[in-house]
Amino acid sequence: MRGKLVDDRLIENGVAPSYYIEGLLYNAPDANFSGSYEDMVYNILSWLQTTTDRSKFICANEQYYLMYDDSPVCWPKADGEKFINAVIKLWNDWS
């Protein structure tokens, strides 16, 4: 999905490195990882869409917040939000 977002110029290359996407998945509740792959993607994207306070998301190594400005080891908030919004829109508009 990230590759399609970049190819379609919906996000810039480098906005969503894989380890930050991994961090989003790490924060998703375990209950979202059930059913088919399609179910899992839908559940996780729905959860991301309804989780408006993402300030406490942590990296998978549990050492840093996932989205935090002015840190070389964190995802800038604007980039994280841009990816989340773009991937939700991509899913909703998929044909």
Image (spheres, grey):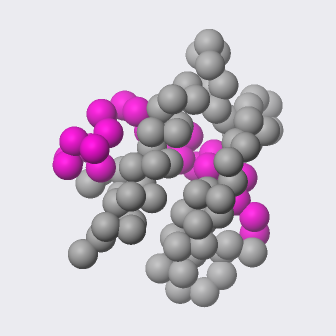
| Residue located at (37% from left, 31% from top) | 14
Which residue is depicted at the point 38% across and 58% down? 89
Give coordinates of residue 15: x percent, y percent. Answer: 40, 33
Side of 49 relative to 28 (left or right): left
Q: Residue furthest top?
A: 70
Task: Identify which residue is drawn at 64% across, 32% down.
Answer: 67
Q: Please provide percent x and percent y for residue 8.
A: 20, 49
Q: Is residue 58 in view?
A: no
Q: Residue at x 75, y 69 (%)?
A: 30
Quarter in which the N terminus is drawn: bottom left
- Extreme-bottom residue of the structure: 35
Q: Is residue 40 left or right of residue 86?
A: right
Camera-nearest residue between 77 and 72: 77
- Residue 93 lies in quadrant: bottom left
Q: Give 47 or 74, whichever is nearer the viewer.
A: 47
Residue 82 image position (x, y, % from top left): 45, 39
* Drawn side of residue 66 relative to residue 22, left or right: right
Tell me the quarter of the image containing the C terminus: bottom left
Write the start and end of the magenta stretch as one range: 5-30
